[in-house]
Amino acid sequence: MESHLILRRKDREALREKWLQRAGQAFERMFAKANQDQLVTFTQREDMACALGQELATFLLEEHVAADIQVQPTEKRPPCCPRCQQPAQVVNKPKGRKEDLPERVLTSRAGQVRMRRQRWRCQKCRLVFFSVRPKAETGDGGLQSTGIAENGAAGSQGAFLQGSQ
């Protein structure tokens, strides 16, 4: 299976340092003497530990998604439409920097996750979508049922389209 990450060793080590710094800050927030008067009951301790864990999980998700090769696929190998599998066309070309890409917020089990992805358009289906991988399929998260898109965010209650539904 091909890799979906584009992290060079130097970038990976910098990200590790960033992670260790965040984890250290989370530890200090939990165990610093100044915070102990707010962490008396078990519920207060549990709430703080879970909130810190959620922040760290969100950090990991955002960084992993940002390093994905499909953030900005090349036009030589564009992603395919999740409906008809035809190659898509880029909506608008950013100036090459990831910061210029449109931002999308997903609701995940870890909380709100921000990600930047290139947008693509299928001429046949007239569908605009964020790049996922060269070939997306129904049932793998590539398409959501209409009910989810209208009534709630991805990750909330609902079902993905399965098979030929």
Image (cartoon, grey):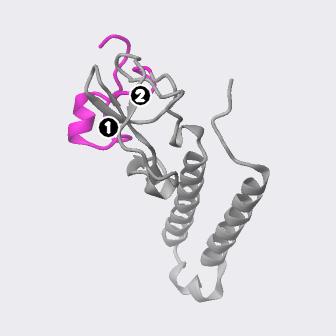
Q: Quadrant of the C terminus?
A: top left
Q: In the rendered view, does 113 fall on the left or right side of 59?
A: left
Residue visible at 56% across and 58% down in the picture: 59
In this view, the residue in front, 44 or 144, is: 144
User: 10 Å neighbourhood of mark 2: few (<14), some, or many (≥20)?
Assistant: some
Q: In the rendered view, does 78 fall on the left or right side of 9?
A: left
The image quarter in which residue 13 lies: bottom right
Q: Is residue 147 magenta?
A: yes
In this view, the residue in front, 52 or 45, is: 52
Location of mark 2 (residue): 142
Give the x, y percent position of residue 81.
38, 24
Q: Disc 2 versus disc 1: distance between alpha carbons? A: 16 Å
Q: Is residue 133 magenta?
A: no
Q: How many marks?
A: 2
- Regarding mark 1 in the picture, which secondary structure is present there? loop
Residue visible at 53% across and 35% down in the picture: 74
In the image, the segment drawn in magenta is 137-165
Location of mark 1 (residue): 157
Assess whether mark 1 and mark 2 are in contact (beta carbons under 8 angstroms): no
Compared to residue 112, the image places residue 135 above or below, namely above
